[in-house]
């Protein structure tokens, strides 16, 4: 919702090469993405927090903190207006569980490969590869819920 309403449908995503690193071949880099960056673990954790209306859960707190920093960054870079920043910050301070229902983005890598930015090793949750994409367009991915 934040990206649709306040960023002209440009999505900021932190992603890995597979949905569940626990199911990846054990001796591959895909298996070495830590739980805090593993999409399956994030999805399950956030879903449990949303389902129980837990406004102080670890997943929500971490995501809200990141979005707060990003909202300020986008405002300073003139990517969003002041009222957009304020709306985002309000949504983070007054969380409505339904707004935080987790979604899975299915992103065909070939279409976006040149825009994937590798996450510096010091910021990754493990040895496995993680990427950031700051400008994913809505027509470049599908959304699923589990």
Image: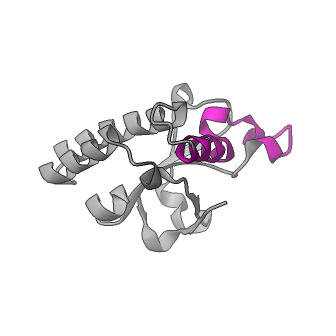
Report the residue that reaches farthest toward the right.
Answer: 26
- Identify which residue, 67 or 134, lies in the foreground: 67
Is residue 43 depicted above or below 64 in this figure?
Answer: below
- Horizontal relation, residue 35 to residue 57: left or right: right
Residue 50, magenta (yes or no): yes
Q: Is residue 29 magenta?
A: yes
Image quadrant occupied by the C terminus: bottom right
Query: Could you tell me if residue 133 is visible in this image?
Result: no
Judge from the rendering whether residue 33 lies leftward or rightward of residue 121; answer left or right: right
**Residue sitting at the far left:** 82
Is residue 96 left or right of 33 when viewed as pictured? left
125 shown above or below 109: above
Measuring 29% from the left and 65% from the top, which residue is drawn there? 8
Number of numbered discs overlaid on the protein picture: 0
Closer to us: 67 or 21: 67
Q: Measured from the top left, where is residue 133 in percent x and y?
A: 46, 52
Chief secondary structure of the magenta span? helix
The residue positioned 69% from the left and 52% from the top of the image is 19
Which residues fall within the magenta stretch? 22-51
**Residue farthest to the bottom?**
139
Extreme residue toward the top, this view: 122
Please name whichever residue, 30 or 110, is drawn nearer the observer in this view of the structure. 30
Determine the residue positioned at 65% across, 45% down: 44
Q: Residue at x 74, y 39 (%)?
A: 29
Residue 132 at x, y percent in the picture: 48, 47
Please provide percent x and percent y for residue 121. Answer: 56, 29
Whether residue 124 can be seen here: yes
């Amino acid at each position: 919702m934040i990206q649709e309403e306040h960023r002209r449908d440009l999505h900021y995503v932190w992603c890995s090469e597979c949905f569940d690193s626990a199911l990846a071949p054990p001796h591959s880099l895909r298996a070495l993405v830590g739980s805090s960056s593993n999409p399956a673990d994030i999805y399950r954790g956030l879903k449990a927090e949303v389902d129980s209306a837990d406004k102080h859960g670890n997943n929500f707190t971490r995501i809200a903190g990141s979005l707060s920093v990003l909202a300020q960054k986008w405002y300073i870079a003139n990517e969003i207006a002041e009222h957009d920043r304020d709306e985002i910050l309000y949504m983070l301070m007054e969380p409505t569980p339904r707004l935080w229902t987790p979604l899975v983005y299915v992103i065909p890598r070939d279409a976006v490969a040149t825009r994937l930015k590798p996450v510096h090793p010091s910021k990754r949750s493990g040895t496995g590869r993680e990427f950031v994409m700051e400008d994913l367009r809505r027509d470049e991915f599908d959304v699923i819920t589990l």
